[in-house]
Structures are given as C-alpha cells and as structure tokens.
Amino acid sequence: MKNSSNKFRGKNNKESKKNSDFGYYSKNTNRSEKNDIFLNNSPKNNKVENLKKNDKNNTFSSIKKRNPRFKSYTEFPNKNSEMHQQYTNKRNFDDWIWGKHSVYEALNSDRAINRIWCTSEIFSSHKFYILLNDIKSKGVLIEEVSWNRLSQLTYGASHQGVVLQLACSKTISLEQLIDFSKHNCPNPTIVALDGITDPHNVGAIIRSAEAFDCKGVIIPQRRSSGLTGTVAKVAAGALEHLHVSRVVNLNRALEEFKNNGFLVVGLSGDGQLSISDFQEKAPLVVVVGSEDKGISLLTQKKCDFILSIPLKGKTSSLNASVAAAISLFHLTGK
C-alpha cells in the first residue's frame, strides 16, 4: 500500500491532495479502478453527491421562487397602461372637440375657435372645405397633420380626422378693431405681439394692456400662443374688457394701421431712442417681440420708431410681459 500510495501521489500530488481534501473530481486519468471504487464509496464523496443533489434542488426551488417575479414582469405593461389612462384623465379636454359631426356643428355656431387640426381627407368634403377656408380668413390656425398625429393629440380617441380647440374669448376682425379704437379715443394704443408663444406672457400682456386702457391686442395666426385657458387665467378677467384680433399676416396688419394714421413703435433692447425721450402724441401700435429673438427683421422695417428701456442694473434684458407693462405705462401717460 505504501508503494501504491506513492504511485498515486506522484506527478499530480498537489491536485490529488486537493481532490481528497475538498471532494473535487481528480483530473488524473491513470488512477486505478480500486481508487475509483474507493472514491465512489468514500464518505467525503457521498457528501459531494449530496451537495450536488442539494444544488439541483436549490436550483429548482430558486426557479420556483423566481417565477412570481416573471409573472409580475408580464403584468407590468398593464400597470403602464393604467398609469397612461390616469394621465390622460388628468389632461383637460374641456375646450376640445373632435369627430366630424361635432366639429361641423361647432364651425357653424358662433363659438370662438382657437385652433384646428385635421387630415388632408377633410378638405375633400365640400361642406368642410368652405367652412375651413372661411374660418382661416378670420385668423384661426388650421394645421394639416397625419392621422397618427391626431391620435397622439387625443390619446387614441375616435377623432375621425378632425380636432378642434375652442378659444376662451371671441376675436374681432382687424377692420372692426381699427374702427372701434378710432371712434372711442383720440389717441388710442394697440398692442401687437410678434412671436410670443408662451401663454403666460400673452396673458400677462393682455392684463397690462387692459389695465393701461389700451383698445385692443393683435395676435398673429402663427408663431404665437392663441387664446387658450391658460391665457385667460393669467389675464385675470382682462379678456372680458379688451378686444383681440387674430391676423393672418402681422406685417400687413401694421401697414393697415399706418394707412389709418397710426404710428408703429417697436420695443427692443437695441433701440437707439429711449422710451422716456419719446414725445409723439398720436394713435400708437406698440409691437412686443419674444424674449429670445425679439422683433423680427421684417417687422422692424415696418416700425416708425424702435424704443428701448434704459436699465441701470447688471441685468441685460427684461421679460416680455414686464417690458410691455413698463412701456405701456410711459406711452399711455403722455
């Protein structure tokens, strides 16, 4: 046994020692059947077999334990859809109308309309074609979009290819605004918005315009916020006492005012004339531009004066609604 033991513990002495101590399978392929029988019947090897069985049992049991997790994972999209439904329920669709019959009746009524989304197929209907062209000439923005876009806007509702958003206040035509302002004040002031898309700024400007006795506000059809519920809320009731006109082209509207004796004044931080030095007494149209881009170049060319507000601090610019309020205070007090 001594010799056989030495032979067994030969070249793979260290590896055999590991196998005998820890129960691992030996990598020595030259061991005898006797040693194999010995290894198979050894108590340590029985422990190894038991450990294997336990490992299999543990694996099976662990899979069983993980099964509920997979079950909950498959239910996750349902939870997502519930959250999505809750989100759509929270969105306010009180001023939205969709469906051909509902929209058609709204177009035939006297209700104020802010915006319309529709597919190209709607224009093939003769009755819709006439109504949409008529309402577009009144300044209502009509946007032609795809069917999928309408489904996104309405969150999968049955829109039938047309969606309408009501306005919080009625608008009047440009001619009506000019006649009203000239017959009710010798030197009326009108506020024109150029590229102001934030409804909070639009509402705040409307509030300031009514507070300083301006006779109306001009809002372009595109690149501007419409008369939404947010605008009405920020305006704090001013829309009930102030006329608003939505125009297709702002520059043409300014030309029309100039033809009727109005001076067009633009507000810009780059203006060469300070607003405190402006002494003209005439009907005015005050153009307020957006905060980032200001008044467009084409609109600046239509202005008779470009005025600036002198700032004394380190702040280089003002919010559009704040600049409008300060300017209206100076211009309407002359």
Image (tube, helix red, strand yellow):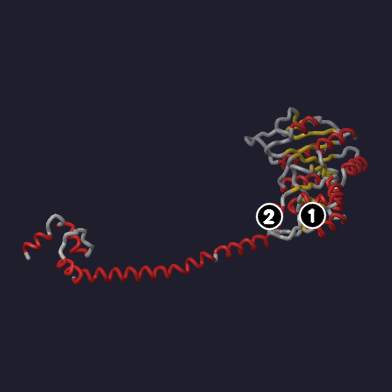
Taking 102 as reference, is 31 left or right? left
Along the line of sight, which residue is nearer the eye, 125 or 211? Answer: 125
Against 50, residue 193 (above or below) is above
> Are there few (<14), some (14-19), or many (20+) residues within 10 Å of tag 2?
few
Query: Could you tell me which quadrant the N terminus lies in?
Result: bottom left
Along the line of sight, which residue is nearer the eye, 146 or 204? Answer: 146
Tag of residue 152: 2
Tag of residue 321: none
User: Mark 2 or mark 1, which is nearer to you?
Assistant: 2
Give the residue drawn at x 67%, y 36%: 317
Image quadrant assignment for residue 201: top right
Position in image of residue 27 (x %, y %) = 21, 58
Q: Earlier in the sequence, mark 2 or mark 1?
A: 2
What is the residue that sits farthest to the left in this orientation?
Answer: 2
Residue 242 visible in this rendered orientation of the protein: no
Give the residue drawn at x 58%, y 62%: 80
